[in-house]
Image (cartoon, grey):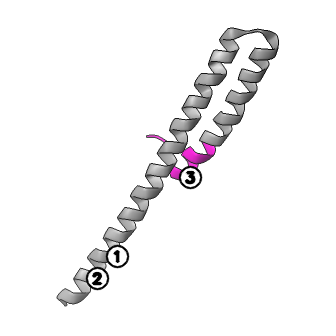
Amino acid sequence: MGDSGPEAGAKGVAEEVKGRAKEAVGSVLGDNDMKREGAAQQRKADADRDVAEHEAKAEKARAASDAHEAEERAHQD
């Protein structure tokens, strides 16, 4: 299974830093493959951060749903 929201967010930050470093080194060395790899790693970082954001929203919605369900049960008794 994939990373959870906070884990995906942290992973996204780390991937972003690594991607920027690779892209910069590739530029300095004239290594187009390394530049492309760095850019791809940054795109992956964006995706990881999107996962984190969506996971956080989903968790908030689950918590709200649980609260509504508990309220509903309280009124049934």
Q: Residue at x 76, y 22 (%)?
A: 24
Quadrant of residue 67 in the image?
bottom left
Q: Which residue is drawn at 36% across and 70% down?
A: 64
Q: How far apart are marks 1 and 2 (CA)?
A: 6 Å
Which amino acid type is marked by label 3?
Pro
Q: Can you give x and y, in whole percent of width and height, for residue 26 in the image?
A: 75, 15
Q: Can you give x and y, in whole percent of width and height, for residue 11 in the image?
A: 61, 41
Q: Is residue 70 placed above or below 31 in the rendered structure?
A: below
Secondary structure mainly formed by the magenta segment: helix
Q: Is residue 70 placed above or below 16 in the rendered structure?
A: below
Q: Name the residue under label 2.
A: 71
- Name the one closer to the observer, 73 or 15: 15
Q: How far apart are marks 3 and 1 (CA)?
A: 22 Å
Q: Can you give x and y, in whole percent of width and height, for residue 3 in the image?
A: 51, 44
In what element is the residue under mark 1? helix
- Name the one closer to the observer, 72 or 1: 72
Q: Give the range drawn in magenta.
A: 1-11
Which amino acid type is marked by label 2?
Glu
In what element is the residue under mark 3? helix
Please tell me how crowded label 3 is: few (under 14), some (14-19), or many (20+) other residues with Cα within 10 Å. some
Q: Name the residue under label 1.
A: 67
Decide which of tag 3 and tag 1 comes sooner along the chain. Answer: 3
Which amino acid type is marked by label 1?
Ala
Q: Residue at x 81, y 11 (%)?
A: 29
Decide which of tag 3 and tag 2 comes sooner along the chain. Answer: 3
Quadrant of residue 76 in the image?
bottom left
Q: Name the residue under label 3.
A: 6
In the rendered image, the residue lying farthest to the left is 76
Q: Can you give x and y, in whole percent of width and height, for residue 32 in the image?
A: 68, 10
User: Is residue 3 in view from this perspective?
Assistant: no
